[in-house]
Image: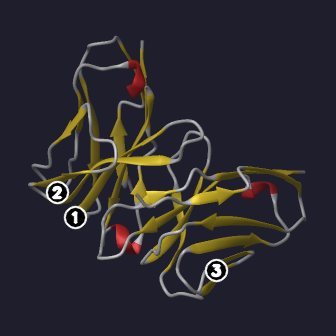
């Protein structure tokens, strides 16, 4: 009964380093999302995908990249990490898309850039 | 840009009290969702409302979508310590947009 699995849960990066946050879901959902949550700021959409091979930008895509080669996986790539990318990152999936809600979230990945 | 304003930002009450939190916007949403998030975890969906004026009840929680589909409220009756958490509203725009807009949340603490 895994649902949405994110790895790693915690990571500390130095400025300028790169890394990939992994996200896998086992519910066969077409829709997948990456959000970041800063203290007191709610969730901001970074990128989303409506199916394998299709991705689109959200509100705050700068400094990030994504790919969606399979239905299950939706990795988020951070290039040249900056302190402004310190945040908690959440991956989510949905069977019918944002209009109907039903987003299932992972437990989050806490990233600190020093 | 569609914005959702949630109020109050913080709320601390005693067990057994009733409370209402609000989610307001100047934009029309095709649907609105409420999530609850506990520390160290991802948000969990509580309810989705789609029709203007719609009221949904989930045990002690009552959700209402405004007639104009611009606002929503969450009312909790006889709050329990297990209701403690961050309550987030999220709106989906018109035209089938996939971009859910989240409010900043109301942090509720229910004291024993």
Q: CA distance from mark 1 to mark 3?
A: 29 Å
Asked if the residue under mark 2 is in contact with the one under mark 3, i.e. CB atoms within 8 Å, the reply is no
Name the side, left or right, on which A17 lies relative to B68: left
Q: Earlier in the sequence, mark 2 or mark 1?
A: 1
Relative horizontal placement of residue A38, taking residue B109 as reference (left or right): left
Q: Residue B4 lies in what quarter of the image?
A: bottom right
Helix, strand or loop under label 2 = loop
Q: Secondary structure at mark 1?
A: loop
Quadrant in the rendering for residue B57: bottom right
Decide: is B16 above or below A4.
below
Q: Residue at x 27, y 41 (%)?
A: A61
Contact flag, marks 2 and 1 (Cβ < 8 Å): yes
Q: Nearer the viewer, mark 3 or mark 2?
A: 3
In the image, which is nearer the foreground, mark 1 or mark 3?
3
Question: Separation of disc 3 and disc 2 at Cα?
Answer: 35 Å
User: Which one is in front, A36 or A11?
Assistant: A36
Q: Residues within 10 Å of mark 2 (few under 14, many from 20)?
A: many
Q: Which mark is residue B64?
A: 3
Residue drawn at point x = 61 percent, y = 52 percent: B105
Placement of B103 over or under B51, stated as above or below: above
Instruction: Assign the C terminus of chain A to one quadrant of the image.
Output: top left
Left or right of A67 in this view: B33: right
Pointer 2 chain: A
**Residue under numbered circle 2:** A71
Q: Secondary structure at mark 3?
A: strand
Snapshot colouring: secondary structure
- Would you place residue B30 above or below residue A101 in this image? below
Spatial CA distance of label 2 from label 1 is 6 Å
């Amino acid at each position: 009964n895994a649902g949405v699995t994110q790895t790693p849960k915690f990571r500390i990066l130095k400025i300028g380093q790169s890394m990939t946050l992994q996200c896998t879901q086992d519910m066969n959902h077409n829709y997948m999302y990456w959000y970041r949550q800063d203290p007191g700021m709610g969730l901001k959409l970074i990128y989303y995908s409506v199916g394998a091979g299709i991705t689109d930008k959200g509100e705050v895509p700068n400094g990030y990249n994504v790919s969606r080669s399979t239905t299950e996986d939706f990795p988020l790539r951070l290039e040249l990490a900056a302190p402004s990318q310190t945040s908690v990152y959440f991956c989510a999936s949905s069977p019918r898309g944002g209009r109907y809600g039903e987003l299932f979230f992972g437990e989050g990945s806490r990233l600190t850039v020093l | 840009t569609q914005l959702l304003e949630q109020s109050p930002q913080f709320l601390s009450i005693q067990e057994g009290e009733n409370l209402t939190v609000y989610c307001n916007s100047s934009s029309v949403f095709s649907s609105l969702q409420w999530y609850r998030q506990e520390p160290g975890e991802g948000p969990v969906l509580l309810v989705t409302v789609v029709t203007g004026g719609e009221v949904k009840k989930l045990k002690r929680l009552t959700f209402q979508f405004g007639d104009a589909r611009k606002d929503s409220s969450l009312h909790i009756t006889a709050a329990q310590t297990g209701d403690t958490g961050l309550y987030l509203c999220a709106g989906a725009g018109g035209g089938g947009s996939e971009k859910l807009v989240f409010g900043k949340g109301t942090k509720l603490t229910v004291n024993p």
